[in-house]
Image (cartoon, grey):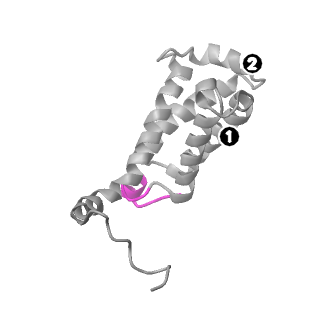
């Protein structure tokens, strides 16, 4: 017997194999939809002032004065988070939308959170780094079978 074998590992509890086999195709779409849906409220804060946010104008002022970014980036960030999150959740134009999320999260890590350390509880970069890496996985993988991209049979 070799360490590397062509057979799949046997389940520890064989009775659960049927359940695992039937549900495992939904793991990736679950992560994709959750990622998109969790981004949307952040965009709603920036765009509409919902959920305790300040809206585009005040967020733009914060971006300009505190982050040294153009105020227009507030609108861009809000659009990526809200509408990009919706598109990611649905799996529509998954790769390009996920690439925008990666860029946004990279910018958030560098411009906003890096100086506060690692842990999110202290305003650190843990949270945007995690979501950026998850989005990167969808840049590499695409929307998958259970996505609008998969439904229409086209993917960028």
Query: Vertically, is 144 above or below 115?
Result: below
Asked whether 67 falls inside the magenta stretch, the response is no
Residue drawn at x 21%, y 63% is: 15
Query: Vertically, is 35 above or below 73?
Result: below
**Residue carrying label 1:** 106
Task: Give the prevailing secondary structure in the magenta stretch.
Answer: loop
Q: Secondary structure at mark 2?
A: helix
- Neighbours of disc 1 within 10 Å: few (<14), some (14-19), many (20+): some
> How many tags in the picture?
2
Q: Quadrant of the N terminus?
A: bottom left
Please tell me in which quadrant of the rendered image residue 18 appears.
bottom left
Residue 133 - label: none
- Side of 23 where 3 appears, left or right: right
**Residue carrying label 2:** 66
- Neighbours of disc 2 within 10 Å: few (<14), some (14-19), many (20+): few
Asked whether 154 falls inside the magenta stretch, the response is yes
Residue drawn at x 75%, y 18% is: 66
Q: Position of residue 110 (x, y in %)?
A: 73, 35
Residues in magenta? 144-156
Q: Looking at this rendering, what residue extends furthest in the left direction?
A: 15
Q: Secondary structure at mark 1?
A: helix
Q: What separation in Å lies between label 1 and label 2 (alpha carbons)?
A: 17 Å
Residue drawn at x 41%, y 53% is: 28
Q: Earlier in the sequence, mark 1 or mark 2?
A: 2
- Side of 27 where 96 appears, left or right: right
Task: Please indicate, yes or no, whether residue 132 appears anywhere in the rendered image.
Answer: yes
- Side of 53 where 64 appears, left or right: right
Q: Position of residue 65 (x, y in %)?
A: 76, 16
């Amino acid at each position: 017997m070799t360490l590397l074998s062509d057979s799949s590992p046997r389940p520890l509890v064989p009775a659960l194999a049927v359940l695992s086999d039937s549900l495992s195709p939904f793991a990736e779409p679950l992560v994709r939809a959750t990622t998109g849906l969790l981004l949307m409220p952040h965009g709603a804060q920036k765009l509409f002032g919902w959920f305790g946010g300040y809206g585009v104008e005040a967020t733009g002022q914060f971006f300009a004065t505190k982050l040294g970014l153009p105020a227009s980036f507030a609108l861009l960030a809000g659009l990526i988070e809200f509408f990009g999150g919706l598109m990611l959740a649905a799996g529509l134009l998954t790769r390009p939308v996920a690439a925008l999320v990666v860029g946004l999260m990279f910018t958030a890590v560098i411009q906003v959170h890096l100086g506060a350390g690692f842990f999110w509880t202290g305003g650190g970069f843990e949270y945007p780094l995690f979501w950026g890496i998850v989005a990167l996985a969808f840049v590499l993988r695409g929307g998958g079978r259970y996505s609008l991209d998969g439904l229409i049979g086209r993917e960028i």
